[in-house]
Image (cartoon, rainbow, N blue to C red):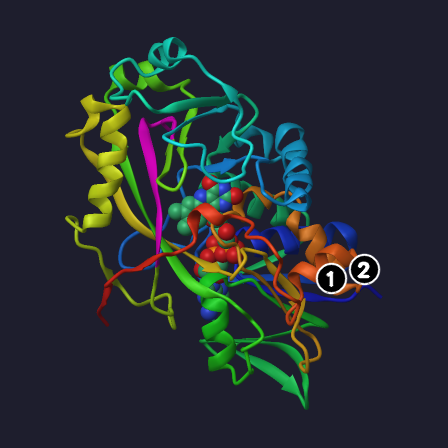
Amino acid sequence: MAKSLIVVGAGVFGVSSALAWRRRYPDASVTLIDPKPLNDKNPEGNWIVPTSEDTGKIIRTAYVSSSYTELAKEAIGMWEVEEPYLKYWRKSGWVVPEKIEAGSLNKGTDMSRERFFELFPNALLEDDEILKEDKSPGWVEASAALAATIQTAIREGVNYVPGEAAGLLWNVGTCIGVKLGDGTEFRADFVVLAMGCWTKDFLQQSGVTSHGVNCEVAGITVLGIQLNEREYEQYKDMPMIAIPEKGEILPPTRDGVIKTNNAISFHAPDLSSRKIPLILPDNHPYFEENIAMLAKYFPGLKHAPIAFRRYCFDAFTPKQDFIISALPGYEGLHVATGGSFHGWKFLPNIGNYVADMLEGKLAADWVDKWAIGAKLSAEFIHPDIIPKRSAEITTQE
Ligand SMILES: Cc1cc2nc3c(=O)[nH]c(=O)nc-3n(C[C@H](O)[C@H](O)[C@H](O)COP(=O)(O)OP(=O)(O)OC[C@H]3O[C@@H](n4cnc5c(N)ncnc54)[C@H](O)[C@@H]3O)c2cc1C
């Protein structure tokens, strides 16, 4: 009989894992647990919004590591043709303006200044900025794509449970299930914790030694700017702008919101509960950096209305490899996390690798990179975005 599975966390890692296991074993009982109620596309308010929920995420194959480039190519192949993904995929390409050719990522071919100014006529480009262009990357409407994938999983038989995991169930040293805050218990052969930046704290709270789970919580400030109709028409088909070591500007969503990520990331406090409201001062200097980045390429938007400000947290590993592994010493218990600011694009395919891990079939190259206790990779996978500073975030019960 097919082994049953509980996945805790319905971000990209968890949803992809639940769907992949159900597709591999259509008779298997698969339960996906997350506090977010269905139909709540982008929960805001006093809850920390999970990393996977966003207006847009970038999908690209440019990686220092050829293994991740291949993994991203496989994902893009699915974004381009498969339901439910293709509806949310926008092949915009990107433009990379940079002062010196930093890093070793392949950012594209040379772009003329004339062409750049056709796209961004008011940009305050400096004389020594080099321009590159690549038409292959794109972006996706992230929250909408994730919600559609959850609906697909439910249609295909995954049992979605809105609830908060409060602990693990044990039979001697074997993990046999998950207990919710309201006392409800779920049992399965395999438990996968895909709780993003909450994974490590949850393990600790559950009495599981988690020092092999080598990740920290890191954050990025994200700012959305509301365009008016004229601005939307002007920029709706723009390519993304990716500024090395500074951040990215994504094209407007259908409701006219341009998003900026501030890639100067920061060390964040551990998040022992997703219910702790964070005080997000509107005038925090990191948000000012978002605005300055936008204003350089769109001076007319410097004082445009702000649609949203948020901190976005991820589980960040030392070399940005994911952690997709059994927990040594705890039979039945596994983790799938460590997105490290680049995990979103793998929504369509990462679950297949989690399923391979559960079955002990994961290719040796990935076991070497993703297993708990694996030697650290020689290279950084996503070096531009390593946290170099700390944020003072005030928490309030
Ligand atoms: C600003 C920013 C921009 C990014 N841009 C990109 C990009 O352009 N392209 C890209 O590929 N990647 C990008 N990333 C990275 C990507 O977003 C993450 O790697 C990915 O979303 C992580 O997904 P996850 O499933 O591990 O975590 P999460 O999305 O955090 O999901 C974890 C889930 O666990 C749930 N959970 C927590 N506690 C409990 C509990 N007790 N019980 C039940 N459920 C629980 C949460 O509700 C949440 O839904 C970006 C990250 C950030 C921060």
Residue projecting furthest to the bottom: 172
Amino acid found under the numbered disc labelled 2: Lys
Residue 253 drawn above or below residue 385 = above
Q: Is residue 220 left or right of residue 144?
A: left
Quick one: quadrant of the C terminus?
bottom left
Say which residue label 2 marks. 361
Give percent across and percent down for residue 172: 68, 91
Residue 170 x/y as whole percent: 63, 85
**Quadrant of the image for the N terminus?**
bottom right
Reading the image, the residue beneath label 1 is 357
User: How far across and down, in percent of the image, does residue 362 sit?
Assistant: 77, 58
Q: Nearer the viewer, residue 343 or 157?
A: 343
- Residue at 65% x, 56% y is 18
Are discs 1 and 2 less than 8 Å apart at CB? Answer: yes
Q: Magenta residues: mostly which secondary structure?
A: strand
Q: Secondary structure at mark 2?
A: loop
Give the residue displayed 36% in from the left and 55% down from the top.
219
Rate crowding at label 1 as few (under 14), some (14 to 19) or many (20 or more) other CA atoms within 10 Å.
many
Say whether mark 2 is within 8 Å of ligand 1: no
The front one of 111 and 53 is: 111
From which residue to which does the magenta span run? 250-266
Q: Secondary structure at mark 1?
A: helix
Residue in the image at 56% along x and 82% along y = 208
